[in-house]
Image: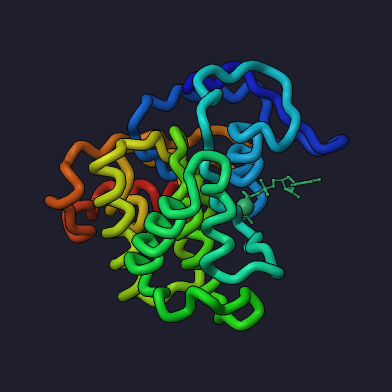
Amino acid sequence: MIISDVDKKYNDLVVFEKLNLTIKDHEITAILGPSGCGKTTLLNIISKTTDYSGTIEGNDGKISYLFQSQRLLSNLTVKKNIEYVLRSYLDKQEREKVTNDILKKVELTEFANYYPSQLSGGMAQRVSIARAFAYDSDIMLMDEPFKGLDISLKKKIIDVFLRLYKSDKKTTLFVTHDIDDALIMANRIIVLSSDGKIVLDETINEPFDERDVGMYGDLRAKIYQAI
Ligand SMILES: Nc1ncnc2c1ncn2[C@@H]1O[C@H](COP(=O)(O)OP(=O)(O)OP(=O)(O)O)[C@@H](O)[C@H]1O
Ligand SMILES: [Mg+2]
């Protein structure tokens, strides 16, 4: 995906001025940066859910977008929320199979018939994750995907994500405030400054299953400094 000279303003507020960023297909990129620097806006620009000027190439495929704020459909059960995004391309039987499979992976099988209002924050977040993972997209956008999850669940879900990624290699951009998440599951880490400029752009080459956050003391310090 090639983002060229993108400008974004909300009235008088300039979020991006001539933003240029090339994302290699099939890579996982982590976006970090202070609150309000434009991370969500960047995902909105890529998903064409907000207007901008400049050009983006390579974002025409199907996009899974795990929003920062929870957007489950309150009148549908957990199961139906997931089946809903599959309705355009899978028949009923296939929808059920994919849904059951992903609910198992995020450990929510027994809550399949709950409504969103009956879930805890972390459970609702996992339904949103399951929905984004289930949808057969080309590009995956995730805005703080692991917020509200305890560490053990987060580890499991990162594992689920990385296993899915191994099989489909979806181009992925995810926003996080957690440097360790980025070190564990990104090929590339980008830090934005408060004025929407790229201040750090680092590539990590080790295969995911050979990584440990302990390996990245220097890089971690560098990212910490940049934020
Ligand atoms: N719809 C909107 N209308 C006006 N201003 C907006 C709108 N959405 C975002 N902004 C402003 O644009 C800037 C970037 O917001 P954005 O949501 O992209 O930040 P962020 O980096 O995702 O922050 P956070 O880490 O808190 O989620 C902020 O100053 C915010 O106030
Ligand atoms: Mg945001």
Q: Position of residue 152 (x, y in %)?
A: 31, 75
Residue projecting furthest to the left: 210
Can residue 25 be seen here? The reply is yes
Where does the image place residue 30, in percent across and percent down from the top left? Answer: 42, 44
Q: In the shown orientation, is residue 26 left or right of residue 128? A: left
Q: Is residue 95 left or right of residue 163?
A: right
Q: Residue visible at 60% across and 56% down?
A: 68
Residue closest to the eye, 107 or 32: 107
Count of all numbered marks drawn on residues in the image: 0
Is 143 located above or below residue 80 in the figure? above
Q: Residue at x 42, y 74 (%)?
A: 108
In which quadrant of the rendered view does residue 75 lie? Answer: bottom right
Q: Nearer the viewer, residue 206 or 115?
A: 115
- What residue is drawn where x is 57% and y is 33%? 197
Q: Is residue 34 visible?
A: no
Percent across and percent down for residue 226 are 45, 46
Front residue (pair 148, 199): 148
Q: Nearer the viewer, residue 133 or 11?
A: 133
Q: How is the image coloured?
A: rainbow
Q: Position of residue 138 (x, y in %)?
A: 44, 33
Q: Residue at x 63, y 63 (%)?
A: 72
Left or right side of 31 for 7:
right
As displayed, is residue 40 above or below residue 121? above
- In the rendered view, tell whether residue 161 sits above or below residue 80: above
